[in-house]
Image (cartoon, grey):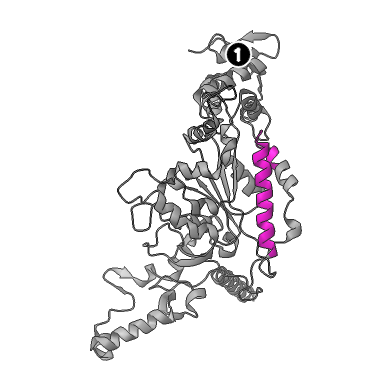
């Protein structure tokens, strides 16, 4: 009796496991082995042995080829290799079960009507002041940039939620961010996407080239978004794509050769920015790879482009200095030389002179510039955000039961050194790493250390940090 019960339990467990595997497989679409298209595009697949699927189009082409070859079916079947495989290749190595998950396409939910859009709940979209409040907790300064971005994102997702049921169709509000390196462009987008809980793809425009040339295709940015959405097409169609270094695809001036990585890329991106159906590979960035292809509509994808635009300030100064004239009311030629926020006065005409084509700029209606970082802003960046760099180091030493403190003079010296490097907030980490390495090495040696205070003399290499050994303060011998 016990043996029968155990056998029944084993059979039930096997059935449950098989049902679980079947449910997992049912969550993904079947892929044609020949053309690599999904079942949603080709129609019902024809099942073959070893979980191989063929679409009706490829099956029909196969029959047509056989009919036009002049061979009879009997001759073909005689010369056909055994079902196990041929040429050292087994069908078991090529079947549907062996396709990696990153190349599988998720099915659409069955309870949704065919052709119905995934409508976002308007009540769940955070208001612009709530978006800006969240950004304030992570990004110091840049109030104007955060305000403009919050409104643009809010309007974009209101447009998605509204759909196309009304007579009035709201245009997309793609964004172009201009700012010096290290001012927080990428960090703003990452924080925004995490707060909205939408898939985010970050691409680099420097690797993009015109189709047919060595480099990434323009559609590869959509492939990255699809991968970030776990191959869920509907989820990807409501995501955000951030294209960094957008200034690197500016039109080359006075070139006689084909501009395959400049103006041609801008022209190829027009259809992406405006919204169209793009056929992209799944799990790869090239259409030449033997991977499934899926159609993604970019109409509801928010595109955010960012770039440092070097020498754009010279173009702006040239435009502003045209107002100069001879006489007492004339402006000085060097009036704008020391203006740190000259990029705030950028216009579309300045961007055209830089090398961006008008059609491209017309599809990026929201244009704003970020402020250059000052010494006070760098000090605030070090200590105010939720994941500030000083808090990270304090957390590391707190795990060793040691309290880490920074004097105000030390922070001022660090900020001044970071400004001299001219790499924005990124310079803070490199400076701190240089001085914190010795401390992180020495502190674990002595378990009696209670507090470490970083002083300005230590940062200036004129002294050592202060250490409190559960008692009086004792200066640490500087490690050279």
Dividing the picture into quarters, in which one does residue 185 lie?
top right
Identify the residue shown where x is 64% and y is 29%. 381
Q: In the displayed structure, would residue 21 be above or below residue 394?
A: below
Q: x and y percent of residue 37 in the render? A: 44, 71
Dominant SS type (magenta): helix
Q: Secondary structure at mark 1?
A: helix
| Residue underneath mark 1 | 456
Dividing the picture into quarters, in which one does residue 459 lie?
top right
Dividing the picture into quarters, in which one does residue 220 lie?
bottom left
Q: x and y percent of residue 138 in the render? A: 66, 37
Instruction: Pick the quarter of the image with the N terminus.
Output: bottom right
Q: In the displayed structure, would residue 300 be above or below residue 387?
A: below
Q: x and y percent of residue 329 in the render? A: 60, 24
Q: In this orientation, which residue lies closer to the viewer: 26 or 328?
A: 328
Q: Is residue 445 left or right of residue 121?
A: left
Q: In the displayed structure, would residue 390 be above or below residue 84?
A: above
Q: In this orientation, which residue lies closer to the viewer: 240 or 472?
A: 240
Residue 265 within the magenta-colored segment of the rendering = no
Segment colored magenta: 134-162
Q: Is residue 64 left or right of residue 461?
A: left
Q: In the displayed structure, would residue 229 be above or below residue 356?
A: below
Q: In this orientation, which residue lies closer to the viewer: 46 or 124?
A: 124
Residue 437 appears in the picture as rendered: no
Identify the residue shown where x is 38% and y is 84%. 60
Q: In this orientation, which residue lies closer to the viewer: 369 or 444?
A: 369
Number of numbered discs on residues? 1
- Neighbor class of circle 1 (other Cα within 10 Å; few <14, some 14-19, many 20+) is many
């Amino acid at each position: 009796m016990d043996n029968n019960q155990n056998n029944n339990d084993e059979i039930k467990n096997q059935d449950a496991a098989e049902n679980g595997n079947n449910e997992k497989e049912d969550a993904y679409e079947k892929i044609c082995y020949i053309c690599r298209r999904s079942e949603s595009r080709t129609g019902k697949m024809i099942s073959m042995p070893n979980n191989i699927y063929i679409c009706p189009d490829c099956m029909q082409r196969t029959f047509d080829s056989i009919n036009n070859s002049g061979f009879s079916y009997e001759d073909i079947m005689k010369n056909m290799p055994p079902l196990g495989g041929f040429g050292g290749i087994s069908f078991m190595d090529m079947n549907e079960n062996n396709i990696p998950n990153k190349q599988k396409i998720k099915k659409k939910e069955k309870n949704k009507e065919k052709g119905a859009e995934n409508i976002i709940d308007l009540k769940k979209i955070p208001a612009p002041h709530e978006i800006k409040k969240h950004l304030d907790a992570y990004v110091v300064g840049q109030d104007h940039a955060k305000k403009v971005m919050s409104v643009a994102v809010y309007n974009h997702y209101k447009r998605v939620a509204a759909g196309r049921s009304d007579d009035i169709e709201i245009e997309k509000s793609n964004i172009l961010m201009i700012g010096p390196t290290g001012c927080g462009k990428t960090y703003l987008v990452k924080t925004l996407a995490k707060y909205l809980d939408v898939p985010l793809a970050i691409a680099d425009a420097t690797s993009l080239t015109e189709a047919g040339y060595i480099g990434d295709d323009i559609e590869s940015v959509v492939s990255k978004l699809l991968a970030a959405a776990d191959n869920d097409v509907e989820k990807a169609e409501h995501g955000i794509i951030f294209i960094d270094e957008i200034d690197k695809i500016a039109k080359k001036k006075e070139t006689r050769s084909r501009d395959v990585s400049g103006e041609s890329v801008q022209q190829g991106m027009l259809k992406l920015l405006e919204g169209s159906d793009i056929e992209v590979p799944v799990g790869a960035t090239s259409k030449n790879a033997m991977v499934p292809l899926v159609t993604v509509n970019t109409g509801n994808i928010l595109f955010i482009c960012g770039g440092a635009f070097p020498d754009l300030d010279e173009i702006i100064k040239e435009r502003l200095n045209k107002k100069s004239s001879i006489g007492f009311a004339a402006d000085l030629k060097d009036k704008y030389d020391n203006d740190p926020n000259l990029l705030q006065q950028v216009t579309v005409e300045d961007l055209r002179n830089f090398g961006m084509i008008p059609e491209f700029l017309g599809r990026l209606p929201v244009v704003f510039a970020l402020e250059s970082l000052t010494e006070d802003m760098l000090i605030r960046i070090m200590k105010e955000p939720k994941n500030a760099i000083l808090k990270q180091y304090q957390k590391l030493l707190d795990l060793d039961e040691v309290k880490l403190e920074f004097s105000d003079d030390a922070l001022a010296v660090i900020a001044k050194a970071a400004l001299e490097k001219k790499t924005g907030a990124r310079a803070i980490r490199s400076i701190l790493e240089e001085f914190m390495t010795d401390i992180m090495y020495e502190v674990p040696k002595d378990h009696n250390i209670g507090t470490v205070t970083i002083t300005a003399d230590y940062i200036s290499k004129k002294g050592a940090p202060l250490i409190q050994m559960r008692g009086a303060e004792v200066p640490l011998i500087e490690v050279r």
